Image: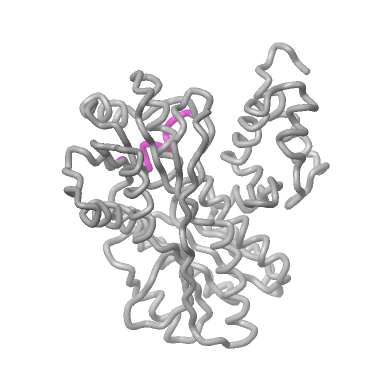
Amino acid sequence: MNAKKPLYSQIHDYILERIENGHWPVHHQIPPEREIAEQFQVSRITAKSAVMGLVNEGYLYRHRGKGTFVASRTAVDQVKETAPQQFSAMPASKKMIGFIMPWMEFRYSSLLISGVEAALSQLSYHFIFKRIKGREEESQAIQAFLDLPVDGIIIVACQGEQHFNDDIARLVLNKHHVVLVERTMQDIRTNGVYCNTQEIGTLMVEYLCKRDAKRIGLVSYPPLYTIGVSDRISSFQSALVRMGRDPLPEASILSISPAILEELNRDEVPQEILSFLQNNRQLDAIATVDALLAQYVGMACVKLNLPHMKIICCDQPLFHPDCLFPVAYIDQSPFEMGTIAARMIVDSIANKTEARKYMITPRLIELSQG
């Protein structure tokens, strides 16, 4: 090993090299962290940090109970930036599914995409992405997919106050095959898969109360960024009331734009989060709507010397060496959500099945603080 490079970086580069030279192909299961630690004669924590770094970057994905696997770089790159001309380059003869989704915390997106890709690959389908930033782009993406054409479209919840979009309604009424992810439409029967957001808030609040958290804060994206974000905030506030507590005041809630995070380097902490914690030192617990925000909160806690802050987040936390790690997280099973959405759209195409809804039950995962 190169003694000039940190052990974490050496393991990271070793795994990345085996992925990029094709030695470990897409969906190949990499060795367990225990074996990696033994091979490089390092601690399990160091091996885990290298693996989680590659998960965060989209090169790997984790499947609970089975292990860690190589993700599709093509799919992940397309999530970052999909140019309109890429649509027209796809062969029309292939069985094709369109996938539309907004900006999301990257690891959640990666697992959702990997789930869709794994299921569609097994079913001999191909798929293409369009990353969007609002309702207008969503409508444009729908039209682009119809022009190709694709056989069906999977659409992840988009920014806006309402779940309704006239273009999606027209898709359904015109008998196109559609599956909505983390989204519902009143009065229109559509295929859909989503997580029980009401249960997410309940699990978070019950756990923090059990840990004797007295003064809780919430770090989120703007409530209208996606329906999923809005629902998580609402369910958290409702759960507080059900537990006999007052809803969080405005001063205890921080909404931070994703555009700010996209401009940061990996080791930077948003000034907005630092200022929020400095101005709210009475807080003893923070809930975040995703794992990326939890990482930034944890990094800010280290910088501000707040070692006793209890952090809980949606989705499996991201590893960072200079970060106060969450005490627990809510597992929404994005990989499973992706596989269900993919199988649902193919079943709709093949069997002309009636519209169905599938609700995933979230689970609270408590993390060891040792």
From this view, report whether residue 140 is shown above or below residue 215: below
Question: Which residue is drawn at the image coordinates 35% and 39% (left, top)?
Answer: 211
From this view, report whether residue 332 is shown above or below residue 59: below
Residue 175 spot, x, y in % from top left: 49, 86
Given the current orientation, which residue lies at the most extreme right position?
A: 23
Determine if the magenta segment contains residue 71: no
Report the span colored magenta.
Answer: 256-265
Question: Which residue is drawn at the image coordinates 54% and 74% (left, top)?
Answer: 147
Determine if the magenta segment contains residue 264: yes
Question: Which residue is drawn at the image coordinates 58% and 72% (left, top)?
Answer: 148
Quadrant in the rendering for residue 5? top right
Depth check, front residue: 291 or 86: 291
In this rendering, position of residue 69 left or right of residue 332:
right
Question: Which residue is drawn at the image coordinates 24% and 41% (left, top)?
Answer: 253
Q: How is the image coloured?
A: one colour
Depth check, front residue: 52 or 308: 308
Locate the N terminus and report the quarter of the image it occupies.
top right
Depth check, front residue: 129 or 271: 271
Residue 221 spot, x, y in % from top left: 33, 46
In this rendering, position of residue 219 left or right of residue 104:
left
From this view, report whether residue 168 is shown above or below residue 72: below
Residue 331 spot, x, y in % from top left: 49, 52
In this rendering, position of residue 154 left or right of residue 5:
left
Quadrant in the rendering for residue 20? top right
Q: How many marks?
A: 0
Residue 228 spot, x, y in % from top left: 37, 58
From this view, report whether residue 165 is shown above or below residue 68: below
